[in-house]
Amino acid sequence: MPLWVLPLALLFAQYREGCPDPHSPPAQPVVGLLVLPLQAFPLQVRQTPDPKASARSLRHCQQFVWHEITEEEPPALAVLDQRGSWYRIQLAAGSGWVQVQILHKFTPIEELIRDGSHLRAGWQARLSATPGASPTIRLPQTYPDSHTYIQILDRQRHNGFTWLRVQVYSQDDPYEPETRRNHAQGWVPIEATWFFSRD
């Protein structure tokens, strides 16, 4: 964790006083999460990744959608697209582009999704037999429950997107392997998954 992030959590807690708790998972598929220092605010948000485009100056925490990476770190912004130093972030109303030229932390979605993550609500019905194929592998009617996770068996790029071969399973007690029950195995795009920020 960068040293400048350590004191930022307390400052963000003060900055975000009275604002909603961080959302998880994001409403739209993301390419990563972005942590910015407080001096980056107000953010100059543009409709296109062009410094000459007209900008809105956004400052209040309720204008943004926050996400938690870990309990110790400050909340992050959901990044929907990235082009060099430009990031398209999710906002409370729509999205917009910001150019980041100061110290910041961007974590790609590939680094966030790991064993023990879970499927997003909209992807809980079926898995695909191969990357890019239509989902045909059904999950049992008993899925999901509050203790359902994925184990990542493989990762592949298909048409520019990351796909994961996952084993979907339930485990009543994470410290008791004998409580594990495997449900199904197949492929999902990485945006079909999300991670637990708190174990």
Image (spheres, grey):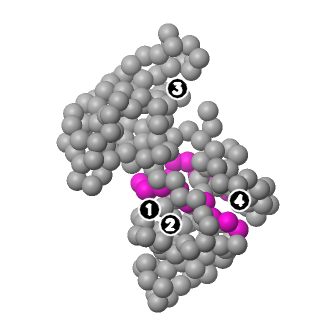
Q: Amino acid at mark 1?
A: Leu
* On-image quarter of the C terminus: top right
Q: Which residue is mark 1?
A: 80
Residue in view at x 78 percent, y 60 percent: 11
Sequence-wise, which precedes: disc 2 or disc 4?
4
Q: Which residue is mark 3?
A: 147
Gap in angstroms between the C-alphas marked 3 and 4: 35 Å
Disc 1 vs disc 4: which is toward the camera? Answer: 4
Q: Under tag 2, what secondary structure?
A: strand
The majority secondary structure of the magenta stretch comes to loop
Residue 194: percent from left, percent from top: 47, 43
Q: Amino acid at mark 2?
A: Ile
Residue 141 visible in this rendered orientation of the protein: no
Q: Which mark is residue 13?
A: none
Q: Which mark is residue 89?
A: 2
Q: Which residue is mark 4?
A: 4
Read off the magenta span: 20-38
Residue 69: percent from left, percent from top: 59, 48
Residue at the front extreme?
3
Q: Is residue 195 left or right of residue 125?
A: right
Residue 166: percent from left, percent from top: 35, 31
Say whether marks 1 and 2 touch (CB < 8 Å). yes
Sequence-wise, which precedes: disc 1 or disc 4?
4
Q: Nearer the viewer, residue 192 or 41?
A: 41
Q: Amino acid at mark 3?
A: His
Up/down of 99 relative to 191, above or below: below
Is 30 magenta? The answer is: yes
Q: Quadrant of residue 131?
A: top left
Could you classify mark 4 by the number of other residues whose Cα lies within 10 Å: few (under 14), some (14-19), or many (20 or more)? few
Up/down of 54 relative to 58, above or below: below
Q: Nearer the viewer, residue 195 or 111?
A: 111
Gap in angstroms between the C-alphas marked 2 and 4: 22 Å
